[in-house]
Image (cartoon, rainbow, N blue to C red):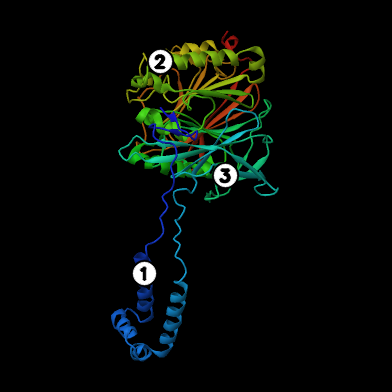
Amino acid sequence: MSCKTTDGSRSAEGGPGQHRPRVRGPLRVEEKHQQQQHVTDDLIVEAVGGRAEPLKAAMQDSKTSLGLRKLIPEEKAKMLSVGVFLFLSYSTAPVVLGVPPIKIQPEQVHLSYPGVYGSMMVTWTTFDEADSMVEYGLLGGKLFEMMAKGSSTIFVDGGSEKRKLFIHRVTLSALRPGFTYVYHCGSGAGWSDIFYFTALNESSDWSPRFALFGDMGNENPQSLARLQKETQVGMYDVILHIGDFAYDMDEDNARIGDEFMRQVESIAAYVPYMTCPGNHENSYNFSNYRYRFSMPGDTEGLWYSWNVGPAHLISFSTEVYFYTDYGLDLIVKQYEWLKKDLEESNKPENRKSRPWIITMGHRPMYCSNNDHDDCTKFESLVRKGLENLFYLNGVDLELWAHEHTYERLWPVYGFMVYNGSREEPYVNPKAPVHIITGSAGCREKHDGFIPDPRDWSAFRNSDYGYTRMQVFNSTHLYLEQVSDDQNGKVIDSMWLVKEQHGVVAWV
């Protein structure tokens, strides 16, 4: 874990938090002379088509102009004489070498919702110390008329090179819900491209639109191009990435993580990119995940909740059940937090304004794949750990990934199907509905299915793709699966209709 430094930044390895860019000192007289002579030689070579040595010898002669006339045409001699004069005149001034702002140029820009009314978090990366500022303004208004400042965190990757990244975070406050803002981020040392976002409309009467998926890598990110375009034309209000990024963010001393974050910038810089950890983030105690993303709460994005429209969304880590070397206490801490959060969201006044409770975690409780993962087992660790808690608190919809396929389940609890009715199974169902959407595309390609689906499996498909979701109102929620293999065709869809929410809906 990190520790604080004197300037308020964090260092992943506890080293000093203040880091200054390397600045080259004044040139020595000999170095300055060598640079001048090098440039002069280059001028001569260019003027005579590569015949430098005879020309330099002629210039050193007391009859320089005669030597020049012998070696090169008259017009080139005149041009060379002027060029050399200008260069020698200029070179009498002090030589100042600028350092290109490569390491302090903002990149990997992404948004997240901090869970505070009228706010948005902007996060980006540099590779040296720089200020953290966002300049922004309303679309159609004066450009960059507002400015917000934040801070940076020093992240030292756990790989052999111990690469150092500066993760910048700035919170924009007092935003007008539903209004579009134009922004860029960085400092006087370097600014990002210009992006835009629409502040979330936090009314419970609003109908937010989501794209959701998991298991997308920087190699074979099959769904990325379609998601980029659909995001930029305004189809989504929020992106949910349900674990497994880049494959893997820590590889090549975290350069794969850098590359992936650059790739998703074209999505994540425009809408909140909300996440949960997956098994591919486990290296160095999930440090690349914990430092790169900025989720609500104080658990470094491992578990948190937030409200959007008529829904209360809960993100949690299934990985606490598998990477116990990082602490068995995490299982207990997360469970207690989940229990408290669910109790709070089930208070009558809260469940009335946010009737839908939707969870997202990486590894599913159920699946009909043939890879012997946890979800294929009767004694699934995730199911044993959380199914009763979610059922007894009336969770409506559970979103998962991990399996590189898409699967929609009938309403299920304890391996038993609890459809609303034979004709309308998703109208007033008597158990939570599960969706597995882990086929966005990565280097591990597809997973397979067992030949015969389980009784609780309603639909399954192994095309690359992703899921769209819209929470229309307090009673109606719509889901559809997009196949990227079939050029964006919708291959599955469903309406989840609930006239009652909470545990009373199961009766």
Vertical placement of 93 versus 70: above or below? above
Whole-Å distance between the Cαs marked 2 and 3? 42 Å
Residue drawn where x is 35% and y is 25% of the image? 451
Residue 55 horizontal side relative to residue 349, left or right: left
Q: Considering depth in this image, is 197 or 61 the residue closer to the camera? A: 61
Q: Amino acid at mark 2?
A: Asp
Q: Say whether residue 402 is visible.
A: no
The dot on residue 33 is: 1
Whole-Å distance between the Cαs marked 1 and 2? 65 Å
Residue that extends furthest to the right in the rendered view of this protein: 141
Residue 336 rendering spot, x and y as whole percentages: 49, 13
**Which residue in the protein does label 2 denote?**
329
Vertical placement of 94 versus 9: above or below? below
Q: Residues within 10 Å of mark 3 (few under 14, many from 20)?
A: some
- Asked which secondary structure carries label 1, the reply is helix
Whole-Å distance between the Cαs marked 1 and 3? 53 Å
- On the rendered image, what quadrant is the N terminus found in? top left
Q: Residues within 10 Å of mark 1 (few under 14, many from 20)?
A: few
Dots 1 and 3: beta carbons under 8 Å? no
Which numbered disc, 2 or 3, marks the residue that appears first in the sequence? 3
**Which residue in the protein does label 3 denote?**
232
Residue 345 rendering spot, x and y as whole percentages: 60, 16
- On the rendered image, what quadrant is the C terminus found in? top right
Which numbered disc, 1 or 2, marks the residue that appears first in the sequence? 1
